Image (spheres, helix red, strand yellow):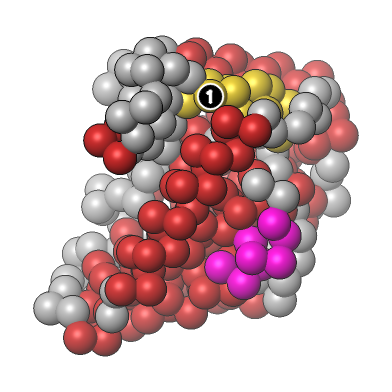
Amino acid sequence: MKQLPDDTKQELSLQLQSVLRKNESSDPASAVKKAWSYNGRAGGAFVGGLKAHLLGDSQLSELLFAEVNPNARMGVAENTVSHDNSFQYALFSYALLLGYQDQVDESAAVLLALNIPNDIRFRAPPEFYLMLAHLWRGETDAAIQMLDSIEKLESKKSEFYIQPGLSTLVRGVVNNEPSLMKEGARLLFDKHLHTTKYFRTALENNHYFCEPVTLLTIVGRKLGVDVKANIGDTTAVLKTKTFSPIDRPEIPAKKKFEVPVDLVPPCFLKKRG
């Protein structure tokens, strides 16, 4: 993968410092909406960890990632809205991405016990997390049975997370079929890169990796399937504008920074607990 250009390093460093200042100044324990505040702190630590990883600072990245799970758990503990399980989905997703397997086990069991398909979402629709929970537990037949509803979501123009290729990738993982894995991942990558190419402002953190493919790579490994080895090249060069133009008047409005990335980042394929 290409090295970060110097101007990109400067931009991402400024973004990282902004995240660190925000997290340092927040105190979820004294917030009015504690659940949202803890979840926001978890999200900030996750974003900071990813930015530090992109900058090659693995020590800082791991320190920030270590803050994610405890704060996400507190978000769940402080939630008082019975129909809002988005905090559970966030905890499950972060635990998968950061390799906390005991937490993934616990969260998968909780989500399947809740089984609320029309719930408030955390990035993805609830159906996606329920399917991942089934896959993680080795309940592949139950996961396959959910693909009809997933495929309906793929065809909706208003759905930005579940995109064509997801159900193909799931079938490839379940059947350990390399051609299906490669086809599904390529469709998801193409859509992901198309979205980032036409993004008019600075990229959001979830644009720097392809979350659906990464999550399915992680659950695939639990099933004994090496998804990443079967889907080919996962690197790409993205382009982002400055995150805060008002703080960087010296940057031309149309200036874009090149960001070489791995769409299935190695920092999310590690076991941490």
Chain part drawn in magenta: 57-64
In the image, 106 versus 62, the foreground residue is 62
Which residue occupies 42% across, 72% down? 72
Whether the magenta-drawn stretch holds residue 59 is answered as: yes
**Quarter residue 98 falls in:** bottom right
Residue type for callout 1: Phe
Query: Quadrant where the N terminus lies?
Result: top right
Whether the magenta-drawn stretch holds residue 98 is answered as: no
Q: Main secondary structure of the magenta part?
A: helix
Using residue 228 as the reference point, say whether residue 66 is left or right of it: left
In the image, 130 versus 192, the foreground residue is 192
**Quarter residue 180 falls in:** top right
Is disc 1 placed on a helix, strand or loop?
A: strand
Using residue 119 as the reference point, say whether residue 100 is left or right of it: right
- Specify whether residue 65 is in view: yes
- Name the residue carrying label 1: 257
Q: Sort mark 1 into few (<14), some (14-19) or many (20+) by Cα contacts within 10 Å.
A: many
Q: Position of residue 122 (x, y in %)?
A: 35, 51
**Quarter residue 170 falls in:** top right
In the image, 172 versus 145, the foreground residue is 172
Which residue occupies 65% across, 44% down? 54
Please tell me whether residue 233 is drawn above or below residue 38 in the rendered image: above
